[in-house]
Image: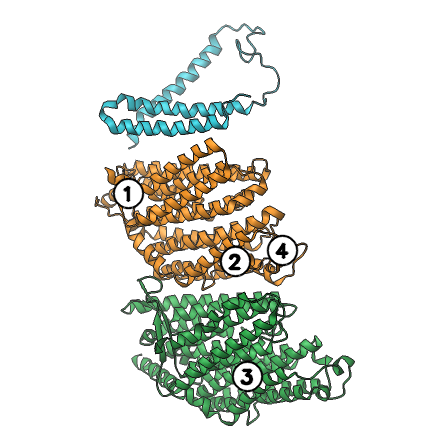
Amino acid sequence: MESSVLSLVIFLPFLLSFPLFSFNRAQHGTARWYALLSSLLVFAGALYLALQFNPSSGFQFEHTALQNWLGDSMDVKYSVALDGTSMLLFAFAAFMFPVVVLGSWERVTTNAREYYFFLLMLETCILGIFSAVDLFLYYMFWEAMLIPMYFLIGVWGGNGRGDAATKFFIYMLTASLVMLIGILSLGYISREMGGTFTTDYHKLLQLELPLSVQNILFWLFGLSFFVKAPLFPLHTWAADVYSESPTGAVLTGVLLKMATYALIRFNVMLFPTASANFAPLVCTLAVVAIIYGALVAMSQPNAKRLLAFSSVSHLGFIVLGIFSFTQEALQGAMILMVNSGLTTGLLLMLVGWLEERRGDVRLSEFGGLKKNMPMFSAAFLIATFASIGLPGLSGFIGEFLTLSGAFKSTTLQTGLYAMLAALGVILSAAYMLPMVQKIFTGELTSERNAALSDLTPREILVAALLVAMIIWIGVAPNSFLKLSETSSQAVIEFVTQKSASQALAK
Amino acid sequence: MIESYLPIFAQIVVAIVLGVLLSTLGVLIGPKRKTAQKLTTYESGIEPVGAAKERVSVKYYLVAMLFIVFDIEVVFMYPWAVSFREYGIAGLLSMVTFALLLLAGYFYIIKKGALEWD
Amino acid sequence: MPNDYLLSLPILAAAGWSVLLIILEAMLSRAALTRVFAMLGFALVGGLSVIGFPLQGLAFSEMLRIGGFQHFANIIFCLSGLLVVALSEKYLDDENVHYGEYYIVAFISVVGMMLLAAAANMAILFIGLEMMSIALYVLAGLMRRDVRSNEAAMKYFLLGAFASGLLLYGISLIYGATGELALHKIAIAIQTGSASMLFWIGFGLLITGFLFKISAVPFHQWTPDVYDGSPTPAAAFMSTGAKAAAFSALIVVVTNFSTLLQNSPTWSLVISSIALATMVVGNIAALAQENLKRMLAYSSVAHAGYMLVGIAAATPDGYSGIMFYTLVYTLMNIGAFGVVALLESKENLLLASDYAGLFKHRPMLAGAMAVFMLSLAGVPPLGGFIGKYKVFAAAVDAKLTWLALAGVLASAVSAYYYLRVVYFMFMRDPVGEAISAPATSSLAFALIAVAVVLLGVFPTEILRITDAALKFAQLPTQTGF
């Protein structure tokens, strides 16, 4: 039975979501308590897996079912497993969901049953994405995730929610469908190279794909991930979606990590030579994203949009870390993924609470909030510092490792990328600090601001949880880094060896 | 391939030539005496009075359609009757089934009142 | 030979049952009763097809070809008929056209579909096609006091007759070229001799006739007008059962000539182009539709395009994908049309914006409709996705990656107009008074929606069946039975 534990954890939220409909439609109180307990239960499951996890070996908790899922001519099956790369993110995603439930505690009062139903469904999809080791299964989760996201944004979002939801859906669907063609092509290529049509990740890793094929497939897959990441210039959906999402914007923090995770898992591992070849191009885009995101963030009058662009900038760092192909940078990217989920998530949640109280998030509306909202200000400040990359908080470790790794990278050959990216760190201070300044310092100019109340105990609990994580990662990063250490090492070795052998063959 | 169609072409040609020839001859050498009776549309038929687009009761159509159905039945019966012996009992059963199917339709028509004139 | 009767038992039972329905209606004249018996009949015939699934062979002097493929198709037709009949009553009542004949004609149409799928001889093929089509013309014009219904019936009849004419002409040319009417004998004649120009012209006309029936571009213009004017349940029937039947026959025809067609680059190019045009035109036109029935009509054109991708791929995987697709499409499209019919009949709600706030009043109905829409858009884990996956996979396999790519992009476009309905249902507040609908029908739609989801998550067994069924569709060219 040990083998199916992972599947159980993945589908637990989905299974637990059905009893929601037996609750009274009008009472949202029961629904949210139920959702909180469910997500905590799932987190406990994920934690159990993380403790059982052996960082020094490869894929664990493997569980396969539904052999020949799509008929006998295709080797497609349900197959899940976790390795170092996914374990960290898997546990992190499971951690974020109780936080999200608590974050939207007061906000969602209408149709709460449905809200939590979609939330739990989304959790299953996300956990599935992080653990699928069959490309078809992965695709199923990846696309199925759109359905709950669409409804979460569209029904419980802000004023422009319907359009934001549609935009999000169409962007993601288009990009993923292109990936579907990539998956199909890869499957048939594996058949041509002797074997059957397969989407089994382990079997596909064994393929020695010719470079020309790798180049095409790299972009068929990459497009989908780059859109979701979002990497410049495919980021145009992000600001709308961030500003219209319900407090589930925190979710967006988790969601975007799926894209960068998928970049490592699929693009880099399946097409190593192409990845190494395209690394300068992708890193250029990443650096552009870092600087462009920061510059645009500076000029945003709206706090949510500012955070959206800051997130574009952060994603640039992560992509740079991945495509530097050094273990240091990759580990940095892993930590950055968690960090950006934590800090941007916390900031968006705080801004969301502000919006609930005040009905507005334009920076010009605020000033002097530190006087009447001390707890709020403190939490906001810590998150801001973590986001900028102050040593001792989570952002610093990730950015430091990424930059130093990128600087030494042999694939990129030049330290220029790292130097330009470092500029982004400075710029991030240049847009984050003025925001803090505008909102919190100065005099309480408006009466409406003076009437705002500080965080409730529930909100303090949520913020404290996230702040604790931020400090924990900042002070003792090794307890997290060790999870992904071996597999990062393996990724880098795999890529170096593959691309070297292919270069020799030429 | 084409040659096998030659007789048909020949017949067409003959038909056209004969038709054109006879009517032309009639016009050219026939005597022409016009009277009022002779110039009516139907020389010995109904008086053509009123608009051509007259409403006809739908019952006529119904009867016409039903007639065609049973007409066709009879058409099918002829070849069967001619080779009755060769088909044997199986042929008889087939024909009875066919007739019964039509009978079911007939039953439906009567029950629905399609044959009631008023 | 009793074997003949055993083999074609579902068809004979269906034909017999339709006579029974006629007598029943004649004696009692009670539409509600006829309806129940029609549903029983569909269940019976479908059940016979399930039981008889392993039987295969040629029946009645090689006129009928029965095998897993035909049985599977029969099940789809019966499912389509059953669902349409089940969902029709309220609509017909509201429109004051609740005649028992409606159910009889629908039943006869299904008999035609079964003959069409089982045709081993082009004479039967034509008879089946006409039996199905003429019944559908009647259904289209059922609301005889309604101008639009009359228009729909007239258009459908004229264009349908035109298509039948082309098809018949094609059959006669093929007969002229090969001297055979039985499909497998034609295939032999072509293999031993060679395909003459005359044959190709005939074959082209035959295929054109089918393309009319499945409303492929450029023969699709009748679709929106006919679907719009017909009674909505009848439109659902045309878009599912009739389309499935035309595709079944098309598959039978092209598998028969597979060796010929696989060596013909022109054929592959022509069918690929038509599939491409159908997907693009259907989806783009659907984007501009405000009226839901017209939107669904264009969407059905687009779906014909996706299915044609499977024909273009010309592999067993492609055909089996189409079969799966028709099954899912039957469920989800009847579901979508059914919801439209349910709401339309009471309040005359036909625009997507009329559905604003449906979620607030009728959450279950709105949820089911959302499932249908998302499945039509091809979002996993719903059934529509697996159907698309199979046909596109076949296209990639057949080195038609460009076609598959165009197909997925077209279906990304389609997401926009399907989502519009969901958007109004869930993300807008209701205007005016609450939309009313009986709770039982909500439950029925919820069940169909569950079936659509299950087909998406656990398609394995159905796909095994379609894969296996397809082996029976290709008869050995020598006289094997």
| Residues at marks 4 and 3 on the same chain | no
Could you give the CA–CA distance between mark 1 and mark 3, rounded to whole angstroms? Answer: 66 Å
The image quadrant where one finds the N terminus of chain A is bottom left
Q: Pinpoint residue C238: horizontal percent, then vertical percent.
A: 47, 45
Q: Please identify which colour was used for chain A in the image.
A: green
Q: Pinpoint residue A471: horizontal percent, then vertical percent.
A: 55, 91
Q: For the residues carrying marks 2 and 3, which lies nearer the camera in this image? A: 2
One can see residue A214 in this view: yes
In the foreground, C317 or C144: C144
Q: Residues within 10 Å of mark 1 (few under 14, many from 20)?
A: many
* Mark 1 lies on residue: C7
Task: Give the numbered dot on residue C368.
Answer: 2
| Residues at marks 1 and 4 on the same chain | yes
- Element type at marker 3? helix
* Mark 3 lies on residue: A342
Q: Is residue A115 left or right of residue A89?
A: right
Which chain: orange? C
Could you give the CA–CA distance between mark 2 and mark 3, rounded to whole angstroms? Answer: 36 Å
Q: In the figure, C430 relative to C342: above or below?
A: below
Could you give the CA–CA distance between mark 1 and mark 4, rounded to whole angstroms? Answer: 50 Å
Asked whether the beta carbons under mark 1 and mark 3 sit within 8 Å of each other, the answer is no
